[in-house]
Image (cartoon, rainbow, N blue to C red):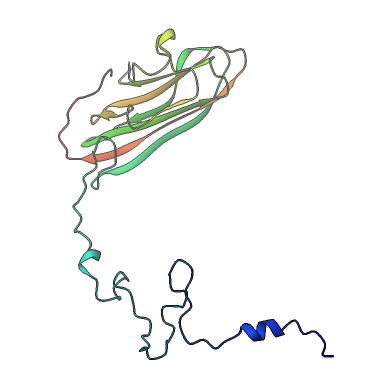
Amino acid sequence: MRGYNPFNKWKLGWKPLDAAPRNPGGGNLTPANHKQPGAEFRPYSKPSHAPAQVGSPSASMRVAKGEPVALPSNLYTPPSGESFQLSRTFTVPAFTHVPMAILTYDTPQQVMAQLLDYEIETDGPGLTLFTPTVNGVRVYPQHGSPSAGFVLAYPTSGNPSGAQLPLKPGDRFQWFVQNFDVVPHDVTVRSSGFLISNQPYEDTRFGG
């Protein structure tokens, strides 16, 4: 009696591949480049959507010629300008009720200055007051707390969208500070912008 061989049924059902297998839905399961009996073998070819080779760009890959962009000179340093930054850190004594000038800048002759932004810092918020002036007159009059007369008493900054300040030749720009606390406080003021010479001046400043 021959022993039972589980592969016998498989051998009975095996037959050589003579045609491309088909699935129940009718689709061809044989790879597209499989060589069928009597069929010509076609090697893989690059699809039409493949990118063009380097050195021979297609029309769809051409880059349009750019146009020069001119940035507004009241927001950015122009090519003919020179940027500058003013800054000072100072310890303001207690009971400094009279405004104390801690930073002074005199615009050079034959030069226009354009301030773009500022920043103030203090370790005594609410008790140290900052006042920016030009020629002794308050500038940035609408910066600060409206409920307290627009005083600058807290760490803050003026960004380029609202801190532009033109300075004519010979103008004096200053930061004043007061300390109403019983202890000294450290403060820092910064202002930055650009200088440009031999340019017509248009007075667009509020205050000063």
Q: Quadrant of residue 104?
A: top left
Residue at 29% of width from left, 36% of height from top?
Answer: 75
Vertical position of residue 2 compared to residue 161: above or below = below
From the viewer's side, name the closer residue of 98 and 56: 56
Residue 155: image x %, image y %? 50, 24
Q: Quadrant of residue 39?
A: bottom left
Direction left: furthest residue: 200
From the viewer's side, name the closer residue of 75 and 69: 69
Q: Quadrant of residue 143?
A: top left
Vertical position of residue 52 compared to residue 84: above or below = below
Residue at 25% of width from left, 23% of height from top?
Answer: 205
Vertical position of residue 207 compared to residue 107: above or below = above
Pick the quarter of the image with the N terminus. bottom right
Residue 146 is left or right of residue 113, and the answer is: right
Residue 170: image x %, image y %? 25, 29
Residue 138 is left or right of residue 91, and the answer is: left
Residue 194: image x %, image y %? 30, 39
Residue at 30% of width from left, 29% of height from top?
Answer: 164
From the viewer's side, name the closer residue of 105 and 116: 116
Residue 128 is left or right of residue 73, and the answer is: right
Pick the quarter of the image with the C terminus. top left
Residue 140: image x %, image y %? 34, 20
Residue at 26% of width from left, 19% of height from top?
Answer: 206
